[in-house]
Image (cartoon, rainbow, N blue to C red):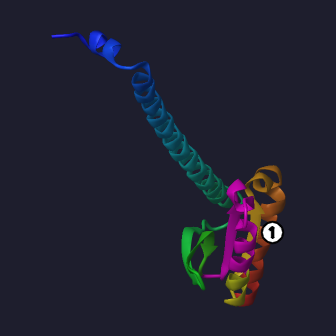
């Protein structure tokens, strides 16, 4: 019985090359798929990190901790807001890098408009802005709470 090497040697070179190319293509495709999954997981982690950071900042600044990933319904179905205080009608969106890709800014504008038209108020900040201008943004959040408290009184 011939060995594997002997059987391969008996095959035409083009056939062996074709098989090897097919295997390399499959491996590259699998690597691309894994890389895509890793990028998606990384983006999800970064979004979550911004939301967790924001919740921690609320505690630090003496602002009640918001409910996270609040569901609203718009013309296109479900809408998720990063943080909201249902009792005062305010919400916060922390925009990561994915909010600036393609048509996402336009979709975000329509979503914000729908939220505002439903009489809920929305504060927005980029994740980078939250990191660089933490005090300035958290002051706005605190003022929103103070303003809501005055109206409720």
**Residue 19 drawn above or below residue 58:** above
Front position in the image: 85 or 3 = 3
Locate residue 138 relative to residue 42 in the image: left or right. right
Residue at (80% x, 62% y) in the render: 137
Asked if residue 96 lies in the magenta stretch, the reply is yes
Residue 73, x across and y down, in percent: 56, 83
Element type at marker 1?
helix
Locate residue 125 relative to residue 24 in the image: left or right. right
Locate residue 148 relative to residue 71 in the image: left or right. right
Residue 8, x across and y down, in percent: 32, 16
Front position in the image: 12 or 72 = 12
**Residue 17 drawn above or below residue 38:** above
Q: Judge the density around disc 1: few (<14), some (14-19), many (≥20) Cα neighbours within 10 Å.
A: few
Magenta residues (range): 87-112
Front position in the image: 15 or 152 = 15
Residue tagged 1: 140
């Amino acid at each position: 019985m011939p060995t594997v090497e002997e059987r391969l040697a008996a095959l035409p070179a083009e056939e062996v090359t074709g098989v090897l190319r097919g295997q390399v293509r499959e491996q590259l495709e699998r690597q691309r798929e894994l890389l895509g999954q890793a990028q998606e997981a990384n983006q999800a982690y970064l979004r979550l990190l911004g939301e967790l950071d924001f919740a921690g900042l609320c505690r630090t600044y003496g602002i009640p901790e918001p409910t996270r990933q609040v569901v609203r319904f718009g013309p296109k179905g479900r809408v998720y807001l990063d943080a909201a205080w249902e009792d005062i009608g305010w919400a916060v969106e922390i925009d990561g890098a994915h909010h600036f890709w393609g048509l996402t800014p336009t979709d975000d504008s329509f979503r914000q408009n729908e939220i505002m038209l439903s009489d809920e108020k929305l504060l927005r900040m980029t994740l980078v802005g939250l990191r660089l201008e933490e005090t300035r943004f958290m002051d706005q959040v605190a003022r929103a709470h103070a303003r809501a408290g005055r109206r409720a009184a």
